[in-house]
Image: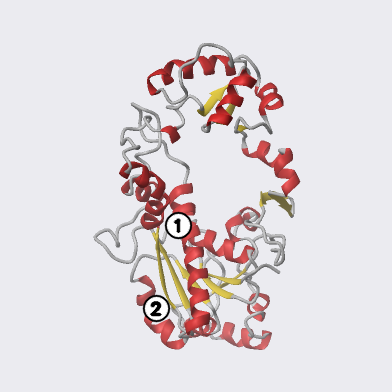
């Protein structure tokens, strides 16, 4: 099930963006095998909460042992794609660099996930999401006027600019490989992805419609009074985005401001005063009262929900945006497909002491697993994965 059914992927275990890309591919039906480092057993409860590892099995391989290295080479020989998230040069030192792997399997798509990229002055430096989005201008653009930049969780670097771009790049390269018969390296860097996500803002800047001062742009959420977040009478929040004239007119009508003396919608000089006026209006009702009045209208409105509230919202429930698997609530696979519908995710499966089940889909039977164990190929999984970016 899923549009990627039949695609086989080997994933080197790592942090955040690499597992997220592998999760996306597994959600879409790819057979993904995660390679863990030999170490101590996974703590109780770990498989249930490591949702980025969902819908795939894992095996622990000792790549310093000849048998373990040979096993990985064999797996890669039968794989369509490979995901690794180490610093540049690490896989080469382990004997699994792109040149070696592509020589053995010319159709292999070799996906590399890093923060800074495979080259450049910072390629060997450590970093995390916040550093990558800082260097691209994305972090500078987010936050209040006169205040410090606001950190948008790790959505922009790790997941939006990282894992999603890696998954997209891998699928693009897989499509090309079907035409050419040749694999290639996908160099997915979070700095590149985060910069790409800022394309719209660069276009606005080129058109003279963007300020490099935080809090002075329409999409900042605190400049245009009709685009932002407002507190309600019960201390909760709602969001409005009444940018187009017809939506703005509906905002005025439903808030009771239509017919009052108001400046033109695009009169920037009047925005601070009108924002204060709207803030007073929204503080006059509870969030539930505003939902009853505005939700589903053309105001472009939504309540600001916490995670548990988002799961319970009628729209998300109707669409099945979240699913519960083994008692763990989690986002469903996205996007949707009309014909090749992805299966419901399965709970993460850690690297087991007996890897027979994990390797069966790769044509390796229990007798060969036993022989490989005797040769020192396998070890227990590592619950504490070192940062590889």
- Please say if 64 is above or below 318: below
User: What residue sits right under mark 1 in the picture?
Assistant: 162
- Picture quarter containing residue 372? bottom right
The answer to whether 248 appears left or right of 104 in the picture is: right
The answer to whether 180 appears left or right of 324 in the picture is: left
The N terminus appears in which quarter of the rendering?
bottom right
Write the residue at 31% across / 32% down: 213
In x, y percent, where is residue 81? Answer: 51, 75
Write the residue at 35% across / 28% down: 147
As helix, strand or loop, the secondary structure at mark 2 comes to helix
Q: CA distance from mark 2 to mark 1?
A: 20 Å
In x, y percent, where is residue 91? Answer: 39, 73
Of the numbered discs in the image, which one, if any, rests on residue 98?
Answer: 2
- Picture quarter containing residue 342? bottom right
Which is more toward the observer, 350 or 125? 125
Earlier-in-chain disc, 2 versus 1? 2
């Amino acid at each position: 099930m899923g549009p990627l059914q039949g695609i086989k992927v080997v994933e080197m275990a790592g942090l955040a963006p690499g597992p997220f890309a592998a999760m996306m591919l597994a959600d879409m039906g790819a057979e993904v095998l995660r390679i863990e480092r030999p170490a101590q057993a996974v703590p109780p409860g770990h498989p249930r909460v490591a949702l980025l590892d969902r819908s795939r099995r894992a095996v622990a391989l000792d790549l310093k042992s000849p048998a373990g290295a040979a096993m990985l080479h064999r797996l890669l020989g039968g794989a369509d794609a490979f995901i690794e998230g180490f610093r540049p040069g690490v896989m080469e030192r382990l004997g699994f660099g792109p040149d070696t792997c592509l020589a053995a399997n010319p159709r292999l798509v070799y996906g590399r996930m890093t923060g800074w990229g495979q080259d450049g002055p910072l390629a060997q430096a450590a970093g995390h999401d916040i550093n990558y989005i800082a260097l691209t201008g994305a972090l500078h653009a987010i936050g209040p006027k006169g205040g410090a930049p606001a950190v948008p969780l790790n959505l922009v670097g790790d997941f939006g600019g990282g894992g999603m771009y890696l998954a997209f790049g891998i699928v693009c390269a897989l499509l090309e490989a079907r035409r050419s018969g040749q694999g290639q390296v996908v160099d997915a860097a979070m700095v590149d992805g985060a910069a790409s996500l800022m394309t719209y803002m660069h276009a606005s800047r080129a058109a003279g419609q963007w300020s490099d001062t935080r809090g002075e742009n329409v999409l900042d959420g605190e400049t245009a009074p009709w685009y932002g977040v407002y507190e309600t009478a019960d201390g909760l929040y709602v969001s409005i985005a009444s940018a187009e004239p017809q939506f703005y007119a509906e905002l005025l009508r439903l808030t009771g401001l239509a017919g009052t003396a108001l400046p033109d919608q695009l009169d920037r000089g009047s925005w601070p005063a009108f924002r204060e006026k709207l803030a007073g209006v929204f503080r006059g009702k509870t969030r539930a009262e505003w939902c009853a009045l505005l939700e589903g209208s053309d105001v472009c409105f939504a309540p600001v929900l916490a995670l548990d509230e988002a799961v319970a919202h009628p729209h998300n429930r109707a669409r099945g945006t979240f699913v519960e698997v083994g008692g763990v609530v989690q986002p469903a696979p996205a996007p949707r497909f009309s014909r090749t519908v992805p299966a419901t995710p399965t709970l993460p499966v850690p690297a087991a002491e007996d890897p027979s089940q994990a390797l069966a889909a790769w044509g390796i039977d229990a007798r060969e697993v036993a022989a490989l164990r005797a040769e020192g190929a396998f070890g227990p999984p590592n619950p504490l994965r070192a940062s590889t970016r």
